Image (spheres, rainbow, N blue to C red):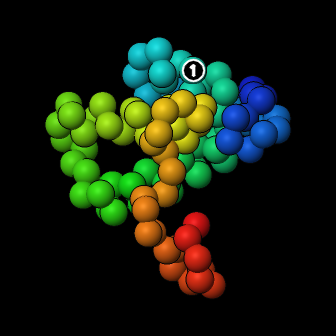
Amino acid sequence: MGQLVNCVVLKQQAEGLDKPTHPGELGQRIFQHVSKEGWQQWLERLTTIINENGISTMDLESFTLIEKHMLGFFFGEGDYGQLPAGFHQAGASGGKK
């Protein structure tokens, strides 16, 4: 078992990531405050954000937008990171998720 972190996603202590998953200061912050399970939740959210908004992962503008979503999802900073407006999860019984 790896290091324990106080995961900002799960709101509890959980096993931390094995290594930083993103470059720079943001990557270090995520490494220190996000668990493996929290990171998996982010990857699911990221997939939805990319698909619903048609975001490319190949250009700098999209990379910057993804970082804004990361800040919103993990740390509640800014107006990003939420599920896209009008998104309905498959199998959900009505309402937005």
Q: Viewer-proximal residue, 9 or 77? A: 77
Quadrant location of residue 57?
A: top left
Quarter the N terminus occupies: top right
Quarter the C terminus occupies: bottom right
Quadrant location of residue 68?
A: top left
Q: Viewer-proximal residue, 87 or 17? A: 87
Q: Residue furthest right?
A: 12
Compared with 5, 53 (above or below) is below
Q: Residue furthest left?
A: 59
84 displayed left or right of 50: right
Spot occupied by residue 54 in the image (x, y as percentages of width and height)? 24, 58
17 displayed left or right of 28: right
Q: Is residue 43 visible to the viewer in this orientation of the structure?
A: no
Residue at 53%, 18% (x, y): give it.
28
| Amino acid at circle 1 | Arg
Spot occupied by residue 18 in the image (x, y as percentages of width and height)? 60, 30
Q: Viewer-proximal residue, 92 or 41? A: 92
Q: Is residue 23 visible to the viewer in this orientation of the structure?
A: yes
Residue at 44%, 69% (x, y): give it.
86
4 displayed left or right of 90: right
Compared with 2, 45 (above or below) is below
Residue at 47%, 39% (x, y): give it.
79
Other residues around mark 1 within 10 Å, as few (<14) / some (14–19) / many (≥20): some
Residue at 77%, 29% (x, y): give it.
6
Quadrant location of residue 51?
A: bottom left
Spot occupied by residue 36 in the image (x, y as percentages of width and height)? 64, 41
Q: Viewer-proximal residue, 27 or 93? A: 93
Spot occupied by residue 93 in the image (x, y as percentages of width and height)? 63, 84
Q: Which residue is mark 1?
A: 29
Q: Circle 1 — which element?
A: helix
